Image (cartoon, rainbow, N blue to C red):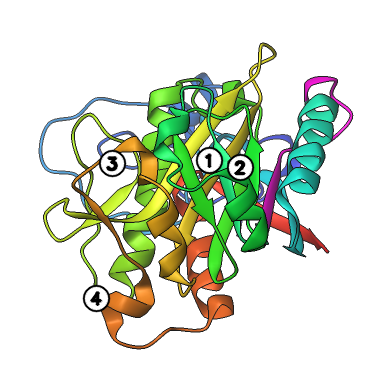
Amino acid sequence: MAAGPAGTAGPSCWKGSKGEALAPGERERAGGDPLAIRRVAGTPPARTGPRPARRWYTARMITTPALRNVRLVRAGLTPYAEALALQRRLAAARSAGQAPDTLLLLEHPPTITLGVRADPANVLLPPDELAARGVALVPTDRGGDVTYHAPGQLVGYPILKLAQHGGDLGRYVRGLEQVIIETLADYGLSGERVPGLTGVWVDGGRAKVCAIGVRLSAAGVTSHGFALNVCPDMAGFGMIVPGGIAGRAVTSLEELLGAAPPVAAVEARLLAHFAAVFAVALGPTEA
């Protein structure tokens, strides 16, 4: 192969833009430029030799952006008041830039929580009766009304800087619902939204399988989240008007499927859908 300009290797016969060979004199007048053009008519013949590549892009320009990382913390069975304090510490640290986004996964002992708009009349038993049954009653700062928690319920509290995840609270709540809807679909169940209500429902909106209630701090950090009923003792919901919504039932995966799937298996599916819906990478994991 003959030497090209500046001593670089090049084809022995440079071509014009339509594929016709340039005579030696034309190459010299073109300064030996292998990209010199002579316009000719007709159909260009097939290229017979290599041609210097002309790229306007770089590898960096076509690289897929890295996913945002969300730390995963599995806290196990945690009393609600302790989990609330942990959320507040994590949210304060995230607001100060001292901690990353975090997804807190856990279960609670039997607990009734009252949201900021809760009507106390939606708790159907007096506090002393609840205490006798071993059920905690805890006011909290999330949205929504009254909710029941118990072991067998998969609870997730995302502590996220919302501006880095779309910045829209309504869209964020719809995202949480979508995570649950896709998790249910893995089990052949059709999760639904009900206009004007939060959470995920089944059976044409007649029964709720997942409660959702969130809080957004002044610094734009989320807390609280979702509670998916996998296999809790459903009798506990008889102590409240769930979500303050009369005339609608509450159900679980165990009731819908006829047998309870392992909570760990449901968790694995849910985490995969959370990562996909919010376009994040989960990890490292902390206990």
Q: Are marks 3 and 2 in contact (CB under 8 Å)?
A: no
Q: Residue at coordinates 81% horizontally, 38% vertically from top-left?
A: 85
Three-letter residue code for mark 3:
Glu
Query: Horizontally, is 237 left or right of 188 in the view?
Result: right
Task: Read off the residue under disc 3.
Answer: 20
Instruction: Please state the horizontal and vertical placement of residue 56, each as a whole percent of the image.
Output: 51, 29
* Between marks 3 and 2 in the image, the one whose residue lies nearer the viewer: 2
Q: Are marks 4 and 1 in contact (CB under 8 Å)?
A: no
Q: Quadrant of the image for the C terminus?
A: bottom right
Query: Horizontally, is 280 left or right of 38 in the view?
Result: right
Instruction: Please state the horizontal and vertical placement of residue 123, each as a whole percent of the image.
Output: 46, 42
Task: Read off the residue under disc 2.
Answer: 59
Does residue 33 sit above or below 12 in this rendering? above
Mark 2 or mark 4: whose residue is earlier in sequence: 2
Mark 1 vs mark 3, CA separation in Å: 34 Å
Q: Secondary structure at mark 3?
A: loop
Which residues fall within the magenta stretch?
A: 95-105
Task: Read off the residue under disc 1.
Answer: 62
Q: Is residue 67 visible?
A: no
Q: Are marks 2 and 1 in contact (CB under 8 Å)?
A: yes
